Amino acid sequence: MRLLPLGLALATLTACEWVADPMTYTREDVPRFKSKAEHPAPAANPTALKVMAWNVKYGACRVDFWFDFWGDRTQLTTTEVTDCLTKIAALVRKYDPDVLITEEIEVGSKRSAYVDMPRFLLENTNLSYAMYAATWDSSYVPSDGVGRVNLGNAIHSRYPIVKAERIRQADRTDQDPLTATFYLKRGIARAELDLGGGRTVAIYGVHTEAYDQDGTKQKQIKQLYDLAKAESLPWMMGGDFNELPPVCDERADAGTPEGCEGKLRLKGFLDERASASGTQFEQPPYTPSVMKPFYDDFSPSITLARYGIGEAAQQRYFTHSVLGPDGKNDEGVPGNWNRTLDYLFIRQSDAWRDTDVVQGPGVFGITQDAIRLSDHAPVVGTWELR
Amino acid sequence: MKTALLSVLLASAVLAAPRPARDTADVGKQGDYSVGIFNPLRIAIVDGIELEANPLVFFVAPNVNARFRLLGGPLRLTAEAGLSVPTFGLRLMKGFFFPSWATTPNDIGWMVVPRVGVLLSGTVLEHSVWTARADAAFRVPLGPNSATPLNSFVAPLDLLLAAPLTGVCARVGGAYDHALGDTLRLRGEANLFVTGGQGNLTFSGANLGALAPLSQLIVTAHLGLDIAVFKQSRVTVGVLFANFDNGRTQVVAGADGFSDRVRVRSNNFLPTLDYIWAGF
């Protein structure tokens, strides 16, 4: 509370621009964007939509940043960002989705060379419409030279976006006031797409908390469930949930049928570095049970039966690795996808086909190597509208 | 209480003549000195030559500036030359304004920053002074450097670190310092700064390419009031305006309901306050 006058003063000093936007909204409309380039028209009155959700790591590809604990970088050159985005756009063009959800996408951030990434994807894919929901907007973050940051979730579409909004998520409560002031403020992107013929669908782009130790992520995931449950339009929700699939119940004792032992790795991932332990970027314990309602009441793109039991079966659907293939961990093991954090869900009355995780070249004829383009893999599928 | 304190301070001022104008080409007589909390310590070591240093940062960023009177009389011309070594001070800001570089040997390089300048002042009315100035500071690297420009949200901080971080900071500016009776001075100042570019990103000895460009022009204007207190001192209050590019963008809505994001310059309005103690 004592920081409030300081915050107000700083806001005044910078002439109407927040040093760190407190994001006091609950739910509000956000701007929509349209491509300047001409793109092929989408299919009229579609019965299915190809969708992709991808955490694009602010266009850094496999440059290791300081909070990853595998590198020291805090800033990218313009060429590094545009080269990376060009490869990301090429992969998106090859899959050619009707809807693209991106997380960790940025506009005007110092670390990503002030590139307007939603605009870049608008002009370099077949997606003609976009909305962007900022979740972190600070004119200066005084931490390791991060500087100006504007990060968020975006939704791109071949069909017109007729409504775009962002919905606020709970903030962490385990940070000191100064850190909390400059920390990101999670939010959900929601877009309504006009498919023609009077049909409208809702798309949710999500990215929940990664480092909290106070149950914030669990609250955020519960909010996502409640929103999806209450949605009146046909809907699809996708993104980085920062949570493992509910193969087991982490609260159950080892050796019980519900226990996770031998079924799902909960800790000790190959990309975790010992030096991160005790820092604000230490991996908190996963709680896959919080995802169970999504699998019980909605339709996931990769079912638990397909996901399987144990790492050998599951690794085909892993979506995340902090460590890239050119790096080795402290035991000399090269980086590779090692856990699933990214998902696509629809309501149970609709159906999926051709779903997968684009871990590398070969999936759907894609030639780009996704593991070199981000620390997350794209999750894809065709959403059959019923 | 505040009124009483102000009355005491003003009553103790010597009312025979206003305080001299500040930051002009005028150079004091031997023994003259002044020092503020933020304003530099300035001492005239002989008639016509002053040394100045900023004590607030002196022990982390040693700095000295010499001022030489070249012309006296109605038109005064003064040359300035100085040097600072900012590296240690900059390194204290690692982890906040600069990367920690915890896992690589990257660091803020050693450097010296020489500075040269010239000021021309003239008197109008009896005690009012106009001043025109031009100066420039340059970075002379003494080793490898991985620090990049700050691009912060307050222009004065960027200006302070412009020469060490962008390689150069040059200025042309003008000021008018008007005496309002014996106790007040009204001062207006405007400056145009040109800094170096963002440069290339150097990391672990490799040149990774150009950083995103930002405008190198910074415009500042300051309006201040000096209030004479005690025998020779003054309190200064004012407002500093700065217009600069720190990567800010704005969303502009179009007639078709779709928007575009455009780059805009940032503005600062900053209060200024100092107490300057002077002696003759």
Image (spheres, coloured by chain):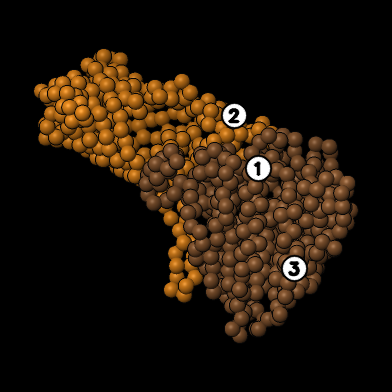
Same subunit: marks 3 and 1: yes
Secondary element type, mark 1: loop
Say which residue appears at 75% left-offset and 64% top-offset: A296
Q: Is residue B28 left or right of residue A275?
A: left
Query: Disc 1 residue type?
Result: Gln
Q: Say which residue label 1 marks.
A: A213
Q: Residue B143 got which mark?
A: 2
Residue B121 picture location, percent across and down: 23, 33
Three-letter amino acid code at the position of disc 3: Ser
At which x and y percent is residue A271?
77, 43
Is residue B75 among what the camera can see?
A: no
Q: Along the line of sight, which residue is nearer the eye, A319 or A247?
A: A247
> Disc 2 to disc 1, how far (Cα)?
43 Å
Judge left or right: residue A284 versus residue B14: right
Chain B as rendered: colour: orange
Q: Which mark is residue A377?
A: none
- Is residue A294 depicted above or below B172 in this figure? below
Q: Which chain is brown?
A: A
Give the quadrant of the N terminus of chain A.
top left
Q: Residues within 10 Å of mark 1 (few under 14, many from 20)?
A: some
